[in-house]
Image (cartoon, rainbow, N blue to C red):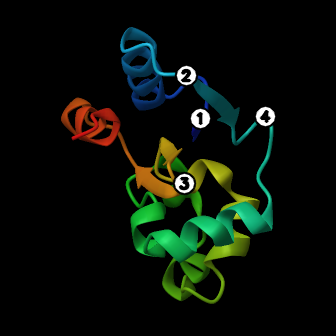
Amino acid sequence: MAKLFGIKNCDTVKKARQWLDTHSIVYEFHDVRADGLTENKVQEWLTKIDWQVLVNKRSTTWKQLSDEVKDNLSEANVTQVLLDNPTLIKRPVLEHEQAVFVGFKAADYDSIFTKP
């Protein structure tokens, strides 16, 4: 089963959820703000995608971070920064068949869920 991570009021997450519902894709939704995240989950994602893809540098959360945190963000400390600021994660994060996908585009979801 697919698992979608995001926050309920995010427009992009809403679009992804609507796409999944419209295409009758069974999935579990995990709200990273309300339900939280574990260090293991973030590290699992980081073994499958680059940390710079996971960090949303266009977010309000990014803009509110101190310059010190932004200037020193690295692979070594990104897990803790994301755990402290889960809305810094680019949304949604989709887990499907051992892969992790970040963001939402209908064409990408078509490819992800269409079997050859």
Q: Earlier in the sequence, mark 1 or mark 4?
A: 1
User: Circle 3: is it few (<14), some (14-19), or many (20+) Cα within 10 Å?
Assistant: many
Quick one: 12 or 41, which is closer to the camera?
41
Secondary structure at numbered mark 3: loop
What's the distance in space between the residues labelled 1 and 4, CA to CA? 21 Å
Determine which of the numbered discs, if any, sits on residue 26 in the image.
Answer: 2
Q: Quadrant of residue 5?
A: top right
The residue tagged 4 is: 34
Secondary structure at numbered mark 1: loop
| As drawn, 103 above or below 107 | below
The residue tagged 3 is: 89
Residue type at tag 4: Ala
Q: Quadrant of the N terminus?
A: top right
Secondary structure at numbered mark 2: loop
What's the distance in space between the residues labelled 3 and 4, CA to CA? 14 Å
Residue type at tag 2: Val
Residue depicted at x 26% and y 36%: 105
